[in-house]
Image: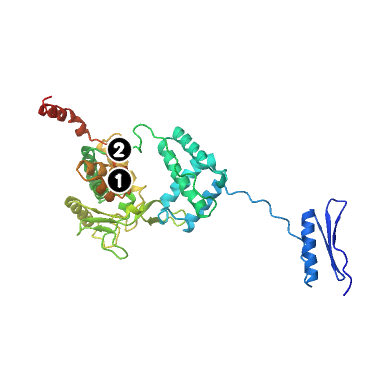
Amino acid sequence: MGENLPSGIDALPSGRYRARAAVDGRRVARTFATLGAAVRWRDDAHDALVAGAEPPGPLAPPPPPTAPVSVADLARAFGAGIRAGTVRARDGRTYTPSGSRRIESLMRLHVLPRIGATPAVSLTRKHVQRMVDALAAEKGPETARKARGALAAVMRLAEDDDLIERSPVEGIRVPQQSGSGPSIRPLTPGEASRILHAAARDDAARGRSLAVPLFGLILATGLRLGEALALRWAPHHGDDGGLHLDDGVVRVRWSLDRQRDRVTREIKVGPPKSRAGVREVPMGTDDVAMMRRHRLATGRPDDGALVFSVAGAPILGTGDPSRTWRRLVAMAEVSPAPRIHDLRHTWCVFALRAGVRPEAVAKLGGWADVGMVHRRYGRHALPDETAGAAELLATWRASHGG
């Protein structure tokens, strides 16, 4: 064997470094910008020559330092995961289209402008609490509560990917205001009656059956608009959901989205808003008769057909139903103007006033939190209840010697 020639490093006038490796007369050399890179290559090249292998090529430059994952990065990954079906809610269910849009909007409008650039590993409870307090002061407690929920959903992704040990959103408080809770506008019995009478006149004028059965059903069962528009005449193939007239029940399994798909322009059908939304709601005798009349008026559609449709196609809730509702409210001269969703609130208040236990109202309405029913609806009093309070108090005092 030939004599081993020395391997080494030469500093060049240019400030670069020349690395040499030589074994048994085989000699290779490379030039590097840094001393560390030259040393690593010389050692690897020497070992390769000793083993009779080819020496390594030029070392690739070291990768630039990786930027930490920010809250904005997590939000983008969260949105992509929802679209791919790989990101799910805490209960394991896929997000509804409206639910994913709501989270995306809350993050974009309220969260990312404040903490989007913050690395996820550096986000603390203090950061989140300050953001929530600022939102409550600027936009109101309800916006702050919803933004906190959206951020909590996104930060669960960081937990799942082991980027953080514990979400900094846990334990965050939302400031409350007097009379806190989302504003709701339950109708009085008189207002509800006037709107349904206006609906009958509107249906007759347009030669159709839509306003009375749709809004009457929501008032009778507390369904969300999307749940009502997704109903099919039961029984039908695939599941036990739908409108079961013979049994006098509505079995809620699906909900119609409020927007068309951006690509296909179709109206998507998905699960209800939450796991508690899958439920069975009984109907009164008069309500069953109302829906039987609707089925006859629409040509006796087959089992499995949509209860509310246009030529068999689903109806977009933000289209005809919304326009019809505004027209009916004006015809009935109800002010301040309620929303369609206030029919659901009205159903809940009426049920409580009729003596239905809050636990039953929560189950029938699709709420998992019974306490929310107490807090949000139990405080509402109908006008006749307040108007008669003085007489009731006087009668009680008289009976007790007052």
Q: Quadrant of the N terminus?
A: bottom right
Question: 10 above or below 130?
Answer: below
**In the picture, residue 4 is in which quadrant?**
bottom right
Please state which of residues 359 and 40 is positioned toward the viewer in this rendering.
40
Residues 41 and 105: in front is 41
Q: Quadrant of the C terminus?
A: top left
Can residue 185 be seen from the camera position used here?
A: yes
Real-space CA distance between mark 1 and mark 2, rounded to the nearest whole angstrom: 20 Å
> Which comes before the other along the chain, label 1 or label 2?
2
Q: Is residue 114 left or right of residue 17?
A: left
Q: Position of residue 92 (x, y in %)?
A: 41, 57
Q: Residues within 10 Å of mark 1 (few under 14, many from 20)?
A: some
Vertical arrangement, residue 72 with respect to residue 88, above or below: above
- Residue 185 tag number: 2
Front of the two marks 1 and 2 = 1
Tag shown at residue 370: 1
Instruction: Indicate the position of residue 158 as horizontal and vertical percent values.
Output: 52, 51
Task: Tell me the amino acid under the disc marked 2.
Answer: Arg
Q: Position of residue 20 (x, y in %)?
A: 84, 62
| Residue 87: x %, y % from top left | 47, 56
User: Helix, strand, or loop for circle 1?
Assistant: helix
Which residue lies at the image location 69% right of the left edge and 54% below the top edge? Answer: 63
Q: Amino acid at mark 1?
A: Val
Give left or right: position of 55 versus 242.
right
Relative to residue 169, is residue 225 drawn left or right?
Answer: left
